[in-house]
Amino acid sequence: MGRLRSLLCCFLIVSFVLQPSMDTKLSSVSAAELDAIDVEEFFDTVIAEKMEEVNIPNLTVSVVSEGEVIFAKGYGYADYETRTPVDPETTLFRIGSSSKVFTWTAVMQLVEEGKLDLDTDINEYLDFEIPNTLEYKRGNPQTEPITIRHLISHTPGFEDYMSDVFSLSEDSLIPLSQAVREQRPKRVFAPGEVTSYSNYGTTLAGYIVEVVSGVPFAQYVEEHIYKPLGMENSMFRQPIPSKLADQMSTPYRYVNGEYLKAKFEFVSEPAGSMSSSALDMAKFMLAYLQGGHYEGASILKEETVQKMFSEQDTQHPRLKGMAHGFVTANYNGRDIFKHAGGMMLYDTFLFLVPDEEVGFFISHSGGNYFVNVSIFEAFMDRYFPSEEIDSPTPEPTVNMEQRSKQFVGEYYQNRRSFTTDDAFLSLMIGVIRVNVDDEGYLLVNHLGETNRFVEVEPAVYNNVSEERNNDYGGDFSTIVFGTDSHGRTMLMTDGPMSYSKAAWYESSGFTFLMLISSLLFIIASLLYWGIRAIVRKIRGKNVLEVTKGSRWAKRVAVFQGLLTFIFLVSFLANGQPDPVYGLAKSAFTEPSALSVFLDNIVSYGIGLVTFAVLAYSVVSWVKGYWKLAGRIHYTMFAIFSAVLSWIFYFWNVF
């Protein structure tokens, strides 16, 4: 990836990720009967409203209850050109990270067979070694080995990347054995200490399945999960094999009054490449709700299913966490086991409610994560409403204001890069900002909304909003503060996400202030020198500097200005998000060799020339170059050059 790509994507990805949340009023009402006819009428109304509101081109949904499929239907068109309707049995949708549940199912099958142990060092199963050292802090200190339990709970401690996740080119595909070696992220947290959603961790688990079973991962899933359940319309393979290719739904994005077609997206296989139909997913849900069995076939033992429904990791007793592969939640007083999946165009959600023997699957293209959440919440509110009486809002505790002040600041996702230029994206993606009001309530801004939180015990705060609020981990109702592996204050929420507090010098406000100030001053100086030279040329005055040293000092500064100008032009020229995919093309396509070369020349050039500019700024005072105002200007130019280079260095741009 070019060195400037992270800066480009930083601003572009925001419109794709920060979609408005769908708030639903909490209420306690009588439950409607879960009757097939009533369910269809309900979904026809709710889904039609959402499809019109968000301009969704196609959607598929299935619901199972008490061992039967009570509802499965497609909405919209699988292909707008041929007007092919969505068929819940045969039309395939990309289910993204919901694929991970199949990977964990495969892992637990091998655990049942005694071929894997959840608490054994994963190096015992791999045919290459992952060093047991932290690779973020200096010295590479030794740390505990990673186990499969860490992988399945998203606590292995790997950094993660937000760009280069998707690709539109089949040429980007490499064998799984090569991917886990060449694309291994650094270990930045001690295993088991920080919850941080990890695509690589799941990919690694899928590769362990491949190594231990002796067959390719996709083939293993086909033979041990799809075949027993009769899932004939499901596939991990990329691209879709010819026998199912015609059944693949076409993804669209509604742009300027029309649906624009998107291409097939390629992603890491075990972490998110699966395609499936609503009825195939219904079979999978029924198997889990029936103790691992479906129509005489078995994919897991009942005790294994119960284990997978048991919460194995939570960041705090008041928070919901991870079961064995499922994200845990509680909705209307029912325990929920779920997993979302997102591509650039597709959004999917799988929900299991074991106590009610109910499963819910939904997938669509062209919308967003919160569409699926809101439809599921509407379903639960109608058929499984809350039986609890809303408790009164807790009163502020004594001296809450003093304790709350220590948590004020900006918090970045721990699911991010720490060691590559992708780190710059953390300044914009998923940032949580915490302030405190005069009464000591925390004002927590997340996903474009600010919620008020009250302390219920030391370092534990509850959301006092009367509306239901969601984030990408779950119900944003409780936040807990702790400490991460590096001693930073950590904010924890439901699900596999956590956030660590940024130091003042790495906050987005400070970084962008310095970045914009540096760019403006350097480019304004270049324009000033250029205009001044032209004016003097027109007037017939000598444009040369008095001494050879001052001439070279000015030339070096002009060169720095030109490099900075090229950087800014490159940003503006390539900064438009693709209208269909919502990201800059550099986020999902390979840059050209020339682009990479130019990016490196510009970024490294700015850093190297900075040293010369700083040296000349000192010499200008020693040798008395120019007048006082000229020396001050040049010194400020050198300082802003140093600031720009520091930003590039700190955020790994070079």
Image (spheres, grey):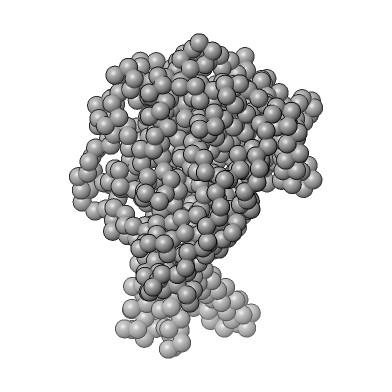
- Report if residue 540 is visible in the image: yes
> Which quadrant holds residue 361?
top right
Query: At x 30% / y 19%, what residue is drawn?
Result: 115
Res 642 visible: no
At x 57%, y 83%, the residue is 541
- Residue at 38% x, 74% y is 399
Q: Is residue 146 left or right of residue 415?
A: left
Q: Which image quarter is the C terminus in?
A: bottom left
Above/below status of 583 relative to 178: below
Nearer to the camera, 108 or 613: 108
Q: Position of residue 247 (x, y in %)?
A: 67, 21
Return the x and y of residue 257 as percentages of the image width and height: 79, 45
- Residue 208 x/y as whole percent: 35, 25
Q: What residue occupies the far bottom of the structure in this picture?
A: 628
Which residue shows up at 58% across the image and 45% down it? 386
Q: Nearer the viewer, residue 486 or 645?
A: 486
Q: Is residue 77 left or right of residue 333?
A: right
Query: Would you identify the image quadrant in which residue 459 lies?
Result: bottom left
Q: In the visual, does 53 lie left or right of 286?
A: right
Of 385 and 374, the residue lying toward us = 385
